[in-house]
Amino acid sequence: MIILGIDTSCDDTSIAVLDGYNRVLSDIVSSQVEVHALFGGVVPEIASRKHLELIGGIYREALQKAGVSDRDIDLITVTNGPGLIGSLLIGLSFAKGLALSLSKPIIGVNHIEAHAMSIFAERYVDFPYIALVVSGGHTVIMVMEDFCRSTILGTTRDDAAGEAFDKISKYLNIGYPGGKVIEDMAKKGKRDAIAFPRPMITEDNYDFSFSGLKTSFLNYDRRYGVKEEEIPDLLASFQESICDVLVSKTIKAAKRSNIKRIVVGGGVAANGRLREMFFEKGGENGLEVIFPSHRLCGDNGIMVAVTGYFYFQKGFVSPIDMKAYSRITLTG
Ligand code: KG4
Ligand code: ZN
């Protein structure tokens, strides 16, 4: 079964072709990082224009690399939310056009669920499991009860974890996107140099708040005037605080729900310190913690195809007039 997976939810134009849910035939991700880096963050209007410019060529490239033609496609899957509405609409309109012209079924996929399911492209995971999706736009803990069945336990009340990295990186003018830059600089720093707060870590819920942590960072700089050589210590301490909150709250969710497995997804899941801390604390608590490989952490079309495949297996097909939506709907 040949599945096309399209994601244009933010600043990557991504298209993958899969045979079934775990045989990746091609996977093209055209990052717009260079354009947005000039502004220190994603500019929605520019992202939409870039998607429009790129999507046709990327589609052709994905088919060519996969060695298939349009007629071989059995199922079209596409992210229809949450994300930047203009960006989503480019991928969704393109996918609808294909579905109509090729007379193929189409499935609209939730981007958060796709991050939580991306692991299936590499290995099978038994249900139920707790998923932590950490990216530039989202920080969500959910229970994955079965295929196509999940409940959100908590989410961020303000900035997402990746957004906090990106904003601090922008503030220090050290590069974009911030997560990888900060991770690399933090390697030379001391994690316990500055005692940044751990927002909401002890609260009896699964929500997050990273905006206050960002303010603590700015206040520290304003108060003490950070010198160049102190930056690695500052970043290592900042990263430690984010990782500590993410790991503690996810483990709390697993223990309280009596679920033995945790799967982490999203761009921030590429972070080495987050992985290390999760394996260490997960092990101490008798939990299995699973991370997809790096290429599946950031936005990609593979995870969309994987998720759409399982919906199709359950007999689900989206109507051709489905809409794009920008915000996550909390059903938990
Ligand atoms: O999943 P993703 O590619 O796009 C969204 O859905 O947002 O995630 C992008 C986010 C950015 O905020 C970026 O700074 C962060 O993932 N990120 C990282 C790392 N690599 C990317 N954060 C921490 N450590 C990393 N190594
Ligand atoms: Zn994402």
Image (spheres, grey):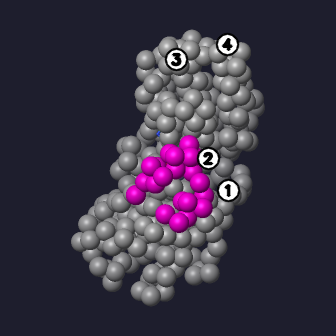
Looking at the rendered structure, the secondary structure element under dot 3 is helix
CA separation in Å, label 3 and label 1: 39 Å
Whichever of labels 1 and 4 marks the residue nearer the N terminus, that label is 4
For the residues labelled 1 and 2, say whether their Cβ atoms are less than 8 Å apart.
yes
Q: Nearer the viewer, mark 3 or mark 1?
A: 3
Relative image position of residue 314 (x, y in whole percent): 51, 70
Q: For the residue marked with disc 4, what is the amino acid?
A: Tyr
Q: State the CA–CA distance, disc 1 to disc 2.
A: 9 Å
Which class describes the residues within 10 Å of circle 1: few (<14), some (14-19), or many (20+)?
some
Q: Earlier in the sequence, mark 4 or mark 2?
A: 2
Q: Residue at x 56, y 43 (%)?
A: 40
- The residue tagged with tag 4: helix, strand or loop? helix
Kindly identify which residue carries mark 1.
328
Q: Is residue 47 magenta?
A: yes
Q: Residue at x 72, y 54 (%)?
A: 330
Which residue has dot 2 on it?
Answer: 138
Query: Splitting the image into 4 quarters, where does residue 22 fall?
Result: bottom left
Q: Nearer the viewer, mark 2 or mark 3?
A: 3
Q: Earlier in the sequence, mark 3 or mark 1?
A: 3
Type of amino acid under label 3: Glu
Q: Secondary structure at mark 2?
A: loop
| Residue 45 placement (x, y as % from top left) | 60, 61
* Vertical comparison of 38 with 247: above or below: below
- According to the picture, the residue beneath numbered tag 4 turns out to be 224
Question: The magenta stretch spans which residues?
Answer: 30-50
| Label drawn at residue 228 | 3
